[in-house]
Structures are given as structure tokens and as C-alpha cells.
Amino acid sequence: MTSSVEQRLTAMGLELPADWAPRGQFLPFRRDGAVVYLSGQICEWDGEVTHTGPVSDTPEGIEAAHKAAQTCALNLLYRLRDACGGDLDRVDMILRLGGFVNCASGFGQSPAVINGATELFIALFGEGGWHARTAVGVCGLPGNASVEVDAIVRLKS
């Protein structure tokens, strides 16, 4: 049985990734009651980093990084599905996103980049997709990825 969240994802022309091995020694998520803490996910698909940094401060660079943030969100959803026992309809709300953009000093477009993840969560979860958020620039990410996003999510009781 496919969750209504995954049906909306399919209707958007998107899919969750295949399983992959983490790049470090950590858990992909940790549950504490109804709260799930998701480890940061980079813009990786089929074992390859899809967008490398630093992000250029051009409309094209920001658009590409926005897409990279969406890929990070898809990776988060894959791990979240595991935390939900395979049913993303158990998600009550996205509490917080942390967004990291590989960029040069002075880059001011981190919020526009991380909107790629935010917009996907809102499209999938409606009001429950709105969240608190940070969007910061950093000088490097794993695999020289252009974007990394982590999340804190509350499940339905």
C-alpha cells in the first residue's frame, strides 16, 4: 500500500531514491517518542553527488542549488519513511529544517536555495509541512555537495 504522501509525490513527477550507504558512521534517524531527528542528507542520488559546490551567485546557480535542496528533501523522506514504519501518512508535521549551502563568503541566497526543500515539504504535507528553519552558508560539505538538509519531524500519536 502506498501512502497518500507518496501518491502526491508521484503526481508531482518525483520519486524516492533507492537505498544507499551513508558517507559516515551515524544513524540515518533517531526517534524519541513521536519526534524523529533526521540526519543531514546531501544532494546524492544513486551514489553520486548530483550538484557540487560552491553554489554560484547567479540565477542559474541558485536554480540548480534549489533543485539540489529538493533532492536532499527526497533523501530525507526516504529515511523518514523508515522511521514511520513505511507509512509517510504518519507524519504530523515538519518541525524544523536545517539547510546548509556550500558557497563563497558573502553569498546571500541561502534561503532561496533551501526553499527547494521547504516547497516540497509544504506540497506534500500542506499546513503540516510548514516549519521553522535555518539556511546558512558553509565553506564545504561531504562529497563537495552543494547542499545538505536535516530535519526534525513529529509523527501522529
Image (tube, grey):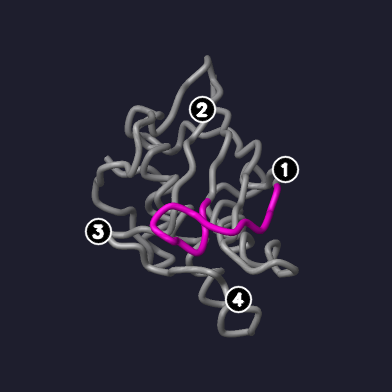
Q: At 75% from the left edge and 69% from the top edge, which residue is drawn?
A: 106
Q: Which quadrant is the C terminus positioned in?
A: top right
Mark found first going from the N terminus, 2 or 1 = 2
Q: At 40% from the left edge and 50% from the top edge, which residue is drawn?
A: 75
- Name the spot of residue 35 as percent of width and height, x first: 56, 23
Which amino acid, mark 4?
Ile
* Between marks 4 and 2 in the image, the one whose residue lies nearer the viewer: 4
Q: Which residue is mark 1?
A: 132
Judging depth in this view, the residue of 131 and 148 nearest the camera is 148
Q: CA distance from mark 1 to mark 3?
A: 30 Å
Q: Which residue is mark 2?
A: 36
Which amino acid, mark 2?
Val
Asked which secondary structure carries label 1, the reply is strand
Mark found first going from the N terminus, 4 or 1 = 4
Establish if 60 lies above or below 138.
below
Mark found first going from the N terminus, 3 or 4 = 3
In the displayed structure image, the side of residue 120 where residue 144 appears, left or right: left
Q: Which quadrant is the N terminus positioned in?
A: top left
Asked which secondary structure carries label 4, the reply is helix
Residue at the extreme top of the image, as rendered: 33
Q: Where are the magenta residues, as a range?
A: 134-148
Mark found first going from the N terminus, 3 or 2 = 2
Which amino acid, mark 3?
Asp
Q: Which residue is mark 3?
A: 46
The local crowd at label 1, few if under 14, some if 14 to 19, many if 20 or more residues have their Cα within 10 Å, is few
Asked which secondary structure carries label 2, the reply is strand
